[in-house]
Image (cartoon, rainbow, N blue to C red):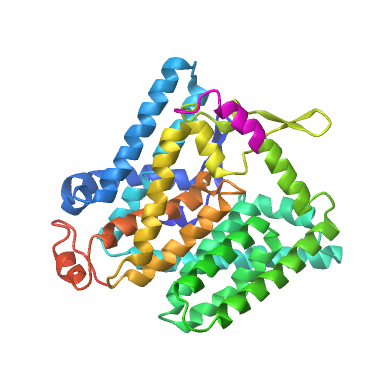
């Protein structure tokens, strides 16, 4: 559990890929798999578990078929194995749920993440006082040495953290005080993607809870417009070349290059090989080739790597989970709803970044899938009665 909470800090490299503390936590969790596989009747009787295993089998099948058609070496195995291995956070989350520590674990994660925000925010303020202005390149380069996911992925992670804080504040209003540290840290990421994801997810929440009054929606719109104006204005003023227009144009060029490669193998893609190995460059205005870096779009990335077949299966599965989380009625419905709002934020962020490839964010995502599987199988008052005899060997604690 501590390894998961320690963020995705790189420990060493395997080929060109960072091996992080998050992967170490996943490997250590394999010791728990026999407990899940052989002792938990609910695990194997759960529809979501069956779907997760279907996704894994489909992924392996696509990889083998692509391996038959393409020459795949060791370096190509690593992205496939990494993609497949991260799905086993589902089992780790299911185990935490079955022993009754899920909510406590989320609380620990929330508090430790907030402490990390305070540390990063203090570094940002020191840089500002040292330079006498907001120096975005200096802030980004310095904070990346403390957390490699800075700024965009960390900003998206903070949006997920926001929804956890909102959920816990329903029980204890003092949790709202954590936002005094989360929001300033989010602002200094200058991540337009993170702010858009936060806005859309909050808007969805207000829309689903709408009553006769439109005042909350209007207030959120005004706050978003004001924050966006300050954020974009500050970023473009202190960092020329970081304009929203430039970012959109470069993404369109990247996406065009990716689509050209996808059209060569549209159905099965490239067998979950590295995206940047398959699409290493894109053409910039003036005919100059530039390194791809990343697709800046999870939908396109997965389309190229897994083809139409896997992409369609996976994204329909995610939308199904969100839908179930929003409509579910039992004594955990608020937890499922707020977790679903965070996944909506992820789906928005995936339009402009690659959050579904970040180990830390994926740890939360597959834990969400496990929560939907575990809590989603119970309706209303049935949860407590069924939960007593859920696990024959592990005593389940209520919370």
Where residue 174 sits in the image (x, y, percent)? 50, 82
Number of marks in the image? 0
Q: Residue at x 42, y 63 (%)?
A: 339
Using the image, determine if residue 245 lies above or below residue 394.
Answer: above
Q: Is residue 380 magenta?
A: no
Using the image, determine if residue 380 lies above or below residue 134.
Answer: below
User: Viewed as shown, does residue 12 lie left or right of 124?
Assistant: left
- Judging depth in this view, the residue of 222 and 119 nearest the camera is 222
Can residue 111 be seen here? The reply is no
Q: Residue at x 56, y 63 (%)?
A: 200
Where residue 129 sits in the image (x, y, percent)? 81, 68
Of all residues shown, which one is farthest toward the front?
A: 212
Where residue 50 sits in the image (x, y, percent)? 26, 44
Q: Quadrant of the N terminus?
A: bottom left
Q: Is residue 264 magenta?
A: yes
Q: Quadrant of the C terminus?
A: bottom left
| Quadrant in the rendering for residue 192 | bottom right
Can residue 83 be seen here? The reply is yes
User: Viewed as shown, does residue 186 lie left or right of 46?
Assistant: right
- Judging depth in this view, the residue of 258 and 142 nearest the camera is 258
Q: Residue at x 79, y 53 (%)?
A: 243
Q: Residue at x 43, y 40 (%)?
A: 312
Highlighted range, magenta? 255-268
Where residue 135 sits in the image (x, y, percent)? 81, 59
């Amino acid at each position: 559990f501590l390894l998961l909470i320690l963020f995705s800090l790189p420990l060493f490299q395997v080929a060109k890929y960072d091996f992080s503390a998050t992967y170490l936590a996943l490997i250590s969790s394999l010791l728990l798999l026999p407990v899940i596989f052989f002792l938990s009747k609910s695990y194997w009787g759960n529809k979501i578990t069956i779907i997760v295993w279907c996704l894994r089998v489909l992924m392996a099948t696509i990889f083998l078929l692509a391996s038959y058609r393409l020459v795949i070496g060791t370096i190509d195995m690593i992205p496939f194995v990494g993609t497949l291995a991260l799905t086993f956070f589902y089992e780790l989350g299911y185990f935490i749920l079955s022993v009754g520590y899920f909510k406590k674990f989320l609380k620990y994660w929330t508090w430790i993440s907030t402490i990390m925000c305070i540390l990063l925010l203090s570094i940002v303020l020191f840089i500002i006082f040292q330079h006498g202005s907001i120096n975005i390149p200096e802030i980004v380069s310095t904070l990346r040495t403390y957390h490699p996911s800075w700024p965009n992925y960390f900003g998206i992670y903070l949006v997920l953290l926001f929804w956890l804080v909102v959920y816990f504040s329903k029980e204890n209003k003092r949790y709202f005080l954590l936002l005094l540290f989360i929001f300033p840290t989010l602002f200094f990421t200058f991540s337009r993607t993170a702010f858009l994801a936060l806005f859309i997810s909050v808007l969805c929440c207000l829309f689903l809870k709408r009553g006769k009054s439109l005042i909350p929606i209007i207030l959120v719109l005004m706050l978003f417009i004001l924050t966006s104006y300050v954020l974009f204005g500050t970023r473009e003023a202190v960092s020329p070349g970081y304009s929203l227009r430039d970012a959109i144009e470069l993404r369109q060029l990247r996406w065009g290059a990716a689509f050209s490669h996808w059209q060569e193998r549209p159905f099965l893609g490239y067998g979950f090989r590295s995206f940047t190995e398959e699409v290493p460059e894109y053409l910039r205005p003036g005919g100059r080739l530039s390194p791809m870096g990343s697709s800046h779009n999870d939908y396109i990335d997965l389309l190229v790597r897994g083809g139409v077949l896997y992409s369609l299966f996976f994204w329909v599965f995610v939308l199904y989970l969100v839908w179930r989380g929003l409509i579910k009625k039992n004594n955990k419905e608020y937890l499922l709803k707020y977790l679903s709002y965070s996944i909506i934020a992820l789906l928005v962020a995936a339009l402009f970044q690659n959050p579904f490839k970040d180990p830390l964010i994926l740890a939360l995502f597959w834990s969400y899938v496990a929560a939907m599987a575990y809590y989603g199988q119970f309706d209303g008052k049935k949860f407590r009665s069924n939960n007593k005899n859920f696990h024959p060997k592990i005593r389940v604690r209520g919370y």
